[in-house]
Amino acid sequence: MKYILLMRHAKSSWEDASLSDFDRPLAGRGLKDAPRMGRYLRKTGYTPDYIVSSPAQRAKETTLLATKAMKCEESIINWDEDLYFSSTQAYLDAIRTAPKHAETTMLVGHNPLMESVGSGLSSGSDRNAIRMPTAGLICLESYGHQWESINWGSCQIKWMVIPRLLKEILK
């Protein structure tokens, strides 16, 4: 069984209007939520073996903060510009090319693509049936034994969690 974690980047800052969208950093709330989600993954045992992240500043910060909180090595991170500039197919390709040894792969990216990918993997349709707030996290499971076999509609949602919920649970 393979697990896929989809995490939307944490809350970004709009404070500096001179920055391009790609270069926007995390806001204060995002700086708290990203490690909170990482701690949750560590506590539940769903730490990834492999991470693919958009290199946009807010996704990069989210990934690094969550990885540190999970106590994972940064060497498991692969920065992929296609998760910022491309399409849902780029997300599926990132999953399909995960290393064979990985049992859990995590993607960190942007909406609306994250919602479309979660919906597509679980239902076969990329119509946004799933709503992911910033730093939202979805765990999907596939009964396939190889990453290459994962396709639209081949997974089921195991759980979903959002930072606001964790803030209440993990006081």
Image (tube, rainbow, N blue to C red):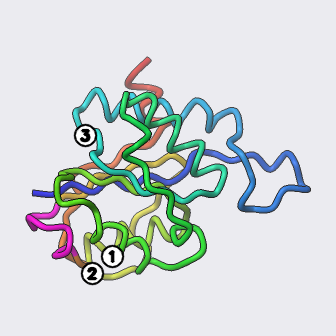
Q: Is the residue under label 2 in contact with that under label 3 (CB below 8 Å)? A: no
Q: Residue furthest front?
A: 75
Residue 18 vertical placement versus 88 (above, below): above
Is disc 1 placed on a helix, strand or loop?
helix
Task: Determine whether, in the image, residue 27 is placed left or right of residue 144.
Answer: right
Q: Is residue 164 magenta?
A: no
Return the disc, 3 or 1, that comes first in the chain's sequence: 3
Characterize the local packing of mark 2: few (<14), some (14-19) or many (20 or more) Cα atoms within 10 angstroms: some
Q: Counting other residues with Cα less than 10 Å from the Cα at mark 3, is it few (<14), some (14-19), or many (20 or more)?
A: some
Q: Position of residue 74 (x, y in %)?
A: 44, 39
Which residue does the numbered mark 3 point to in the structure image?
A: 46
Question: Could you tell me which residue is drawn at 28 percent across and 62 percent down?
Answer: 98
Q: Residues within 10 Å of mark 1 (few under 14, many from 20)?
A: many
- Residue beneath disc 2: 124
| Near-viewer residue (117 or 20) | 20
Quarter of the figure that contains the N terminus: bottom left
Q: Which mark is residue 28?
A: none
Q: Which residue is mark 1?
A: 120
Percent position of residue 13, x then y? 75, 46
Q: Amino acid at mark 1?
A: Gly
Tags 2 and 1 touching, CB below 8 Å: yes
